[in-house]
Amino acid sequence: MRQKLLIALFIPLVVTAGMAPAREDLVLAIGGEPETGFDPMAGWGSYGNPLFQSTLLKRGPALETLPDLATAWQLSEDRRVWTITLRPDARFSDGSPVRAQDVAFTFRTAREAAGPLDLSVMEGAEAVDDRTLRLTLSRPWITFAETFYSLGIVPEAGYGPGYGRAPVGSGPYRFVSWSEGGQLIVARNDDYYGKKPAFRQITFLFTGADGGLAAAQAGAAQMVAVPAQLAGAVPPGFHSIAARTVDNRGISLPFTPPREEAGRQIGNAVTADPAIRRAINLWLDRELIVDVALEGHGTPAFGPADGLPWGGEAPFARDGDGALALLEQAGWLPGPDGIRVKGGTRAAFAINYPASDATRQALAETVVELLRPLGIAAVAKGGSWQSIGRVMHAEPVVFGFGSHSPYQVYALYSGRLQGMEYLNPTFYANPEVDTLFDRAQAAQSLEASYPFWAEAAQHYGMAGDNAWAWLVNLDHVYLIDNCLDLGPLQVEPHGHGWPITAGIAEWRWTCE
């Protein structure tokens, strides 16, 4: 009811605003309303694009590195000191200049906030002068450079407790107003130093996919993000785009035998067996999972970074006969009900998913059905993230990740991060993997680190420990007005935020 009311109120507003065919304003219904506001310290922009704030560097359509606030960046020979030169013409939307002091303040504040970005190794951030920044690390840590692409820079003088709900930044758009749960209005920042976007004003609707689709059908929105279940509901005058992503979904497979540690249950007697983990990976028909659970709107996933230069895991063919033979040889033999048993342990476990997520529910239920002929009795179990948090170290969970940074791989497989919140929930550990991670982190550049991350995949992935069963990479499906040209799209990360807006300066209205 609330969504319908918001749309009913909004449609006449669009019409009376006189948005003619050669429009300069856009209305988007692409979700992503942040609970904590538009504050980079609380995670805004860590997936996708911060929009209001500039970053030191940015990525182009092919994920190539491009300058943003930074014009030069250099890492010291001991890999511990970054020296960064800033452009001289950047200004915040309140008119004040962007100085190295603001950037240093942003990095220090983000470290103290302990948000989702990898800042723990930063020892210091200081302004050498107004245009020169020095960042000092406690040890070589090349994935620290990911913060250059994702940490939005805030003004030292203008940052405070209410910043997230009225942000000031130096990005391509400036904040106008936000009605939480309703809409956000932003205006082009005419003082922006980069390429000026074509659209004077953009309104983001937070009405859900159904509400956004209704707005598009009524002519009140020009782009809508929809789940797979609504991908075929293309309004007249629209077309659909399926953006390629590394927004993956996979099933965690607890790695160790069961034990209790600090009051929590860790490990699983079934998934601790490497034969079970490998058999699951060989058995699952990922193409079928895409067709059934995603209605075709995705691609099979074989690792957490498919197609990225540090991913390392190649697609592999399903081998059902090999999976059956592997379990037989490992002593997992069918019981009277067809479920396999070994040493009194029955091949049965729950697959947890957040009950509010229809896509993860469909994935869990599909996998349950597929595993039954293998002789594994899985059951799909929906719950809150709070309830999942109590069992996620001992039972499989349908998780979702996907990042433009190899730190995502580190967070999933580093033995040093076992069970730290949602990091390495399976308690996976392999000394060879940790050694390769150390070599990657000590590399002289992100590009130089890629071979080490890729080699580690040969140990944690299908060729080695089969530590996870990766299932699919979701397509990000957008229904777009035929007159709106988005230009080239990036491979998008996990769907938090607005990754589609990374190329917003290239968007054009093509109709007159």
Image (tube, grey):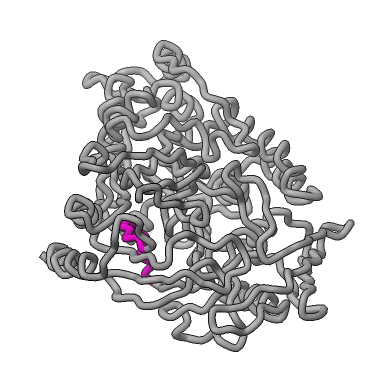
**Residue at 59% in and 67% down:** 54
Q: In the orientation shown, which residue stands out farthest toward the left?
A: 1
Considering depth in this image, is 162 or 389 the residue closer to the camera?
162
**Residue at 36% in and 71% down:** 185
The answer to whether residue 259 is above or below residue 23 is above
Could you tell whether 318 is left or right of 132 in the image? left
> Can the viewer see residue 26 in this picture?
yes
**Residue at 35% in and 56% down:** 22
Q: Tell me where residue 227 appears, x and y as whole percent.
A: 29, 45
> Is residue 123 one of those drawn in magenta?
no
Could you tell whether 169 is left or right of 399 in the image? right
Considering depth in this image, is 405 or 273 the residue closer to the camera?
405
> Can the viewer see residue 414 in this picture?
no
The number of discs equals: 0
Considering depth in this image, is 449 or 433 the residue closer to the camera?
449
Q: Tell me where residue 135 appears, x and y as whole percent.
A: 76, 69
**Residue at 70% in and 76% down:** 104
Considering depth in this image, is 420 or 61 the residue closer to the camera?
61
- The answer to which image quadrant residue 19 occupies is bottom left
The magenta stretch spans which residues? 25-35
Q: Quadrant of the N terminus?
A: bottom left
- The answer to which image quadrant residue 215 occupies is bottom left
> Is residue 31 one of those drawn in magenta?
yes
Q: In the orientation shown, which residue stands out farthest toward the right?
A: 77
The answer to whether residue 16 is above or below residue 476 is below
Could you tell whether 88 is left or right of 165 in the image? right
Q: Tell me where residue 364 appears, x and y as whole percent.
A: 30, 38
Q: Tell me where residue 330 appears, x and y as whole percent.
A: 47, 19
